[in-house]
């Protein structure tokens, strides 16, 4: 069987939100799909792939996944960064998809096989006030979730990260030519959050795993205080308490609290997280396999993390496509040190374009047993949804200064 790449094509489509998809075809007609979606900067990755990567792929052997990874990483000279690593990630996903289809095995079998029967998965609950949040948590439990991320409104703020505005599911990116501007108040948040989590824990009892995302907003000492104040609620993890680029900040948080910490959805290589892992400053590493150079590179991050009792807890927002979710699930199924997969779910139109084999049952996801990644991109269906500019919000403090969104 031959596996020379004859074409690599980029498709941008917007079934409810924008997704960038890479299609790689071999001379034997095997088609591999990769996700390359970088929320709010979609066209940068699309151009990177279309203009600079696709021409290099044609003629290469699709079976040489690691060599292609090294070629694109070392060969670019300008290493790392979210655009480059998402592009490499998309190629990596497509090549694993091709290899699985050539060998007629799901990707997790090629990664060593399943080490568990299913992947603990958490989803999002939101509410403007505590009663609304409790209803939302109950609704997610009724769907079978054993782990739920809770985000609530903050008195005095009219928009808050993670809290929906009437739409069925939370979607942070707003369509339009410019990002919307939000106002943020850390003191109001820090006063309110412990009340919220004490109420949620009291409502759900001890078993449900509870998570919370502080979304990069706090200084180390504020984060330490939040961690302490949430200890009674026994969180599964507290996410992104400080901006992720300063790995040393977690040291100060860690010294003050036993609340487990998770960070890393904006990381895109092992270089971004090697120190927090080796110094055991976190409990879960949040890299999304596509954004961090694909299955090949994320597997290395997970294996490194295994040495330090840090588990995988990957980012799985609705702004990466089902291809990324499936790649993440295939890797998770074969990873011993795995914690929980995030899954927000998708608008209905997304399943029309990305036909997927992964399943959710009784709190656990499974990638399914179709060859490759188990997700087929429907090119005809995609044509109905042209790209529309959309941006994540930006945030300002009450005095009008830009702050972390
Ligand atoms: O803000 O995916 O844990 N999940 C998150 C997400 C991110 C978005 C950014 O595109 O923090 O909601
Ligand atoms: Co997050």
Image: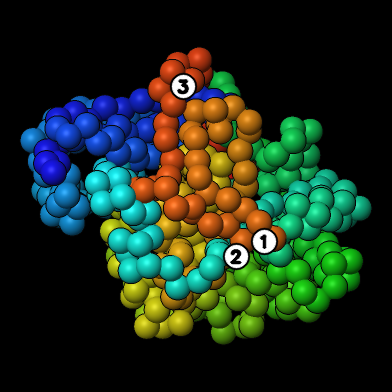
CB atoms of marks 1 and 2 within 8 Å? yes
Chosen colour scheme: rainbow
* Crowd tier of the residue under label 3, counting other residues whose Cα lies within 10 Å: few below 14, some 14–19, many 20 or above: many
Q: Which residue is found at the position 35% from the left and 62% from the top?
A: 109
Residue 272: give x, y in percent of width and height. Answer: 35, 63
Residue 137: give x, y in percent of width and height. Answer: 80, 55
Checking the image for residue 363, the label placed there is: 1
For mark 3, what is the residue? Answer: 382
Q: Quadrant of the N terminus?
A: top left
**In the depicted view, which residue is nearer to us: 234 or 27?**
27
Residue 217: give x, y in percent of width and height. Answer: 60, 56
Residue 293 visible? yes
Q: Which residue is found at the position 87% from the left and 51% from the top?
A: 135
Q: Give the mark, 1 or 3, whose residue is nearer the N terminus.
A: 1
The CA span between labels 3 and 2 is 30 Å
**CB of residue at label 2: within 8 Å of ligand 1?**
no
Q: Give the mark, 1 or 2, whose residue is nearer the N terminus.
A: 2
* Crowd tier of the residue under label 1, counting other residues whose Cα lies within 10 Å: few below 14, some 14–19, many 20 or above: some
**In the depicted view, which residue is nearer to us: 269 or 205?**
205
**In the depicted view, which residue is nearer to us: 228 or 105?**
105
169 relative to 50 in the view: left or right: right
Q: Mark 1 falls on what kind of element?
A: loop
């Amino acid at each position: 069987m031959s596996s020379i790449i004859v074409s690599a094509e980029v498709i941008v489509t917007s079934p409810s939100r924008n997704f960038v998809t890479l299609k790689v075809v071999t001379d034997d007609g095997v088609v591999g799909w990769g996700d390359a979606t970088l929320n709010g900067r979609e066209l940068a990755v699309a151009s990177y792939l279309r203009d600079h990567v696709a021409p290099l792929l044609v003629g290469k052997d699709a079976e040489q996944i690691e060599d292609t990874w090294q070629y694109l990483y070392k060969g670019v000279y300008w290493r790392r960064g979210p655009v480059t690593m998402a592009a490499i990630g998309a190629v990596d996903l497509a090549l694993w998809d091709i290899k699985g289809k050539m060998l007629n095995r799901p990707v997790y079998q090629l990664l060593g096989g399943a080490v568990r029967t299913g992947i603990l998965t958490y989803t999002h609950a939101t509410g403007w006030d505590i009663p609304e949040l409790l209803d939302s948590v109950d609704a997610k439990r009724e769907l079978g979730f054993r782990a739920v991320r809770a985000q609530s409104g903050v008195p005095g703020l009219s928009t808050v990260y993670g809290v929906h505005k009437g739409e069925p599911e939370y979607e942070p990116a707003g369509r339009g030519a410019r990002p919307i501007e939000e106002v943020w108040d850390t003191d109001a948040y820090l006063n309110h959050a412990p009340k919220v989590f004490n109420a949620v824990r009291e409502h759900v009892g001890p078993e449900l795993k509870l998570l919370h995302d502080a979304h990069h907003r706090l200084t180390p000492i504020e984060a330490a205080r939040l961690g302490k104040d949430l200890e009674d609620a026994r969180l599964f993890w507290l996410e992104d308490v400080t901006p992720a680029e300063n790995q040393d900040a977690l040291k100060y948080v860690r010294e003050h609290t036993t609340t487990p910490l998770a960070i890393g959805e904006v990381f895109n290589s092992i270089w971004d997280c090697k120190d927090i892992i080796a110094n055991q400053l976190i409990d879960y590493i949040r890299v999304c396999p596509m954004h961090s150079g694909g299955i090949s590179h994320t597997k290395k991050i997970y294996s490194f993390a295994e040495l330090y009792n840090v588990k995988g807890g990957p980012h799985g927002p609705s702004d990466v496509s089902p291809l990324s979710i499936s790649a993440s699930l295939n890797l998770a199924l074969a990873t011993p040190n795995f914690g929980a997969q995030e899954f927000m779910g998708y608008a209905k139109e997304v399943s029309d374009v990305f036909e997927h084999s992964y399943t959710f049952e009784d709190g656990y996801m499974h990638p399914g047993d179709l060859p490759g990644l188990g997700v087929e991109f429907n090119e005809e269906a995609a044509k109905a949804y042209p790209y529309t500019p959309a941006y994540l919000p930006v945030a300002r403090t009450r005095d009008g200064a830009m702050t972390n969104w």
